[in-house]
Image (spheres, rainbow, N blue to C red):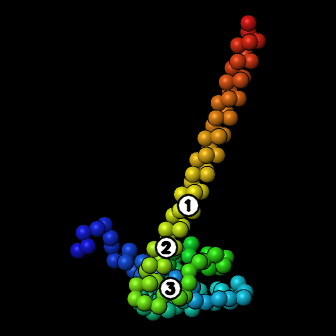
Amino acid sequence: MSGGDFTAKDYRTWYGTALALELLCGQSFRTQREAKRNITAVLEQIASRLGNTPSICKKCYVYPEMLERYLARTLVASPALARRPNDAQRMLVRFLSALAKQEAGKLAGNARQALTAQRGKRRRESGEANERSTAKS
């Protein structure tokens, strides 16, 4: 129907994650216990809209990184952004784009470390080979 490689689950996941972002970005907390209660309340709201249980919504329909960032106080989204229709979806696109940039940066850093380690290994092996050939002469 959409022409894309999407399923109903993809749309439900998008909706559940966008709704979670919209609802969580407006809720502050003082303790981890309070944060977990906020997450539970949000999951209950999502479950009622999707016709599922909160645990299934958490497991299948809300991006886990968002909940982790909320608990860590690093979920950056403004409740002021979620005032018009589709604003929550725009916030979700920004959130996922920022995550993708962070992951790309991590991957690039890991690749640089791997290349540096590989070059160091080659240099050590080359040095050992030179020492062996010098010792034979």
Which mark is nearer the camera, 2 or 1?
A: 2
Residue 78 visible: yes
Choose the circle earlier in sequence order: 2 or 3. Answer: 3
**Residue 45's spot in the image, x, y percent?**
49, 92
Q: Residue at x 34, y 77 (%)?
A: 8
**Residue 7's spot in the image, x, y percent?**
33, 73
Q: Which residue is mark 2?
A: 94
Q: Is residue 109 above or below residue 122?
A: below
Which residue is most to the right? 135
Q: Is residue 79 above or below residue 66?
A: below
Image marks 2 and 1: residues in contact by CB distance under 8 Å:
no
**Residue 62's spot in the image, x, y percent?**
50, 78
Q: Residue at x 43, y 90 (%)?
A: 84
Which residue is most to the top? 137
Along the viewing direction, whichever of 40 and 130 lies nearer the viewer = 130
Q: Quadrant of the N terminus?
A: bottom left
Q: Badge 2 local density, few (<14 within 10 Å), some, or many (20+)?
A: some
Residue 53 visible: no
Choose the circle earlier in sequence order: 1 or 3. Answer: 3
Identified by mark 1, the residue type is Glu
Q: Which residue is mark 3?
A: 81
Distance between the alpha carbons at the discs numbered 2 and 1: 14 Å
Identified by mark 3, the residue type is Leu
Which mark is nearer the camera, 1 or 3?
A: 3
Tag 2, which secondary structure?
helix
Identified by mark 2, the residue type is Arg
Distance between the alpha carbons at the discs numbered 2 and 3: 11 Å
Distance between the alpha carbons at the discs numbered 1 and 3: 24 Å
Q: Is residue 121 above or below residue 85?
A: above
Q: Residue at x 39, y 80 (%)?
A: 12
Q: Which residue is mark 1?
A: 103
